[in-house]
Image: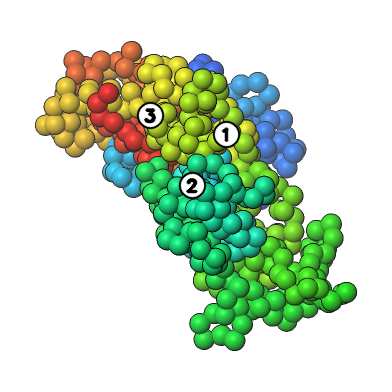
Amino acid sequence: MSALTELHDSVRTAAAAVAGGAEGAAVEKATLERPKQADHGDFATNAAMVLTKALKRPPREIAADLAQRLQDDLGAVLDRVDIAGPGFLNVVLADAWFTGALGSVLEAGDGFGAGGADPPRKVNVEFVSANPTGPLHVGHTRNAAYGDALARIFEMRGHQVSREFYVNDYGSQIVKLATSVQARARGQEPPEDGYQGDYVTELARQVDGADGEDLDAIGAAAVQVMLRSAAESLERFGVHHDIWFSERSLHEPAEGATGSAVDHAFDVLAEQGRTYEQDGALWLRTTEFGDDKDRVLRRSSGEHTYFASDIAYHQNKLERGFEVLCDVWGADHHGYVPRMHAAFRALGGAAEDLDLLIMQFVNLKNGDDLTSMSKRAGTLVTLDDLVGAIGVDAARWFLLARSHDTRVDLDLAVAREQSSENPVYYVQYAHARIASVLRDVGPERVASALAEVDSSVALGTALHASERDLLKLVLEFPDVLAEAEERRAPHRLTTYALELAQAFSAFYRDCRVKDAEPAGLKSYRIALCVVTRRTLARALGLLGVSAPDQM
């Protein structure tokens, strides 16, 4: 348990004692936060305010009782508790609390912030899943950065995670790809509704027999070429998929079974009374689960709808033992969400176990560069183009810097800039600066500092506000990580990493390290540099961004 969690628990314990143990729900609403104004203490709590209604007492009166209880419970690690406004409590901690908290972070080592999943679950994150009919574009790139960061967060929280790419290798788009490749191989223009771009000509060169008559074979071979290219691009971007799942496989007889996975899903739904036949078509009763109308699964012609594939795919995931399904979809799938949630519940899945996460669009600024990046694929800006222009680190940072349901405006000029105007450069520079400070101190002194720091270390002087603020921010990392998982919000880590880098810059400005005196204070500051560096590196790593020691 982190020092910050322990402090929060102390506040709730005090609140429960003041309430006589009878107001558990109100006690759980007691928060502990860093106040925005420095003169409001190290932390502020609303504990007295949330008890007012239940206890039918003035909040400042309750606050006075809470302040006394906290003084009694926390003892020497508490400097004072101030009552502010209508009844808020501003908690000011003694330096001994900070040295003890720093010691606990050091003791946790690389496990600081890890774990916490309650309970750990088997999670499937399906992301990118681009049609294998063209190169991965900048929208897919955002999808890749987000899905991979989300998977890393799940893993650090203690879940078992599989990264999956759903290959749309079934249907009319593959026929169109085959006819387009065939046309290029024969020196002709692709059909009007086919695929354009130089990559189709390249495909025609790589597919054996592309000028032949077997469109199924041409399409299958072209898909494999496109998938190899996509996998290579994603690996260069730091993204690896554990599973590449073929949509076509859902429509083929499964090994040892008499029918396909789609047929099996239909059987599962029929057994639960969720389907009916009308006008020769098979329908799913999605209106029973909040959809605006029932949906067709099999047309009167016998053809399966795309929805049927998706249902079979999710049934397959459930049967593979996944407990949480996170599907990362493009913005054009927004209208598809209600029916998919309805289908998942019709299969017997719990609504809270399916997350359908809709990504929003990416706008690239800087027109000149956009023009030069677009030559290879018509008007398409590819993943490789973007990485070539600004690098993996900048691309991942800027694509993750905003919530997935918010549009990203990526300014290529800013992303290339090596200055404080570029947030990823600023954060990486902070990490490199800490590494430089620790090299300057020397490994032997660093080792001795780490061995000395705990609640009993003799600082010899009061801590500076900047070093207190820096450690408070380090201590928030487990809570930020938990929030990023709960909200499916990797962007919280970009915000946190930038705040932590800014806090270190203030510390570096205000506090000497190598020449700090007395020895106890120097040890504290060295140890603080170590945990800040580790935490910055871990936050960047979860984003898929490197943490350089030199720049």
Between 198 and 134, the residue placed more toward the observer is: 198
In-front residue for pair 504/404: 404
Give the residue displayed 32% in from the left and 40% down from the top.
Answer: 104
The disc label shown at residue 202, or none? none
**Image location (x, y in percent) of residue 389:** 42, 28
Residue 204 rendering spot, x and y as whole percentages: 47, 52
Q: Earlier in the sequence, mark 2 or mark 3?
A: 2
What residue is disc 2 on? 201
Q: Does residue 350 appear anywhere in the picture?
A: no
Secondary structure category for the residue under label 2: helix
Which three-letter amino acid code belongs to the residue tagged 3? Answer: Leu
Real-space CA distance between mark 2 and mark 1, rounded to the nearest whole angstrom = 16 Å
- Select label 2 or label 3 by which is in front: 2
Residue located farthest toward the right when viewing the structure as drawn: 279
Q: In the image, is 57 to the left or to the right of 353?
A: right
User: Residue placed at 37% from the left, 18% from the top?
Assistant: 418
Give the mark nearest the N terminus, 3 or 1. Answer: 1
User: Left or right: 168 with respect to 424?
Assistant: right
Which residue: 50% across, 59% down?
211
Tell me where residue 423 sits by quadrant.
top left
> Would you name the residue on which mark 3 appears?
471
Question: What crowding class fits label 3: few (fewer than 14 Cα within 10 Å), some (14-19), or many (20 or more)?
Answer: many
The residue identified by callout 1 is 379
Name, please, the residue furthest toward the left.
Answer: 444
